[in-house]
Image (cartoon, grey):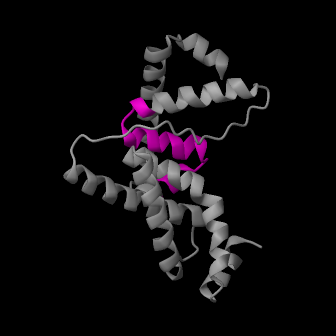
Amino acid sequence: MDERQRIQQVLSGNTSAFTYFVETYQDMAFTIAYRICDNMQDAEDVVQESFVKAYRNLHAYRGDGKFSTWLYRIVYNVAVTHAKSRLRLSEHEKEIDDASLFSQTDLQLSPEAIDEQREIVAHVLDLMPKSDALILTLYYMEDNSVKEIANIIGLNEPNVKVKLHRARKLFKEKFIACYGETEKELQLQQ
């Protein structure tokens, strides 16, 4: 059964069919929310609110793009709104938790090496501005296209390309600064 059929089931009154969307997209929704909120509890609240909004507004989904793009746009908007209101309430109370929800497809690495890579990537992303970390996460971890990212975060495609280029460059700089790797060693690891 494809997603359009599942959406029709939900719209026809089968509310339990929405469980598919929660189970399928909750990890990436959390990653987006966490990258913006920088707090596990807030990210969980944002994800929950986002799924409720998506459920209530499912009738507004036009189906002209991927469902995930539509949903991630909701998550992004809710997270930004939440982060702005949280900033107003308390300026510098941040709780930093390590959230490494990144997919790994290199089967040649041992589980320990994969865990180490995830920790390194999460650490470097945590050092970056939230918007840069989010763009890298959406592009590399979730395999969204530039067009999909533009729809999710509300920028035009050329802007996303520029931000993606700058984010890659910043990631590399932060990585080298933290882990002392040279550019040549980085290329050998890829």
Vertical position of residue 173 compared to residue 14: above or below: above
Q: What residue is shown at x 54% (from left), y 77% (from top)?
A: 62
Work out whether residue 57 can be spotted: no
Work out whether residue 30 can be spotted: yes
Q: What residue is shown at x 68% (from left), y 37% (from top)?
A: 104
The one nearer the camera, 164 or 104, is 104
Q: Position of residue 82 (x, y in %)?
A: 33, 58
In the picture as drawn, the residue positioned furthest to the bottom comes out as 12
Vertical position of residue 178 compared to residue 93: above or below: above
Q: What residue is shown at x 39% (from left), y 48% (from top)?
A: 36
The total of numbered circles placed on residues is 0
User: Magenta segment, which residues?
Assistant: 126-151
The one nearer the camera, 54 or 159, is 54
Vertical position of residue 163 compared to residue 50: above or below: above
Q: Position of residue 19 (x, y in %)?
A: 64, 70
The secondary structure that most of the magenta stretch takes on is helix
Q: What residue is shown at x 43% (from left), y 33% (from top)?
A: 126
Residue 135 falls within the magenta-colored stretch: yes
Name the quadrant of the C terminus: top right
Q: Position of residue 11 (x, y in %)?
A: 60, 85
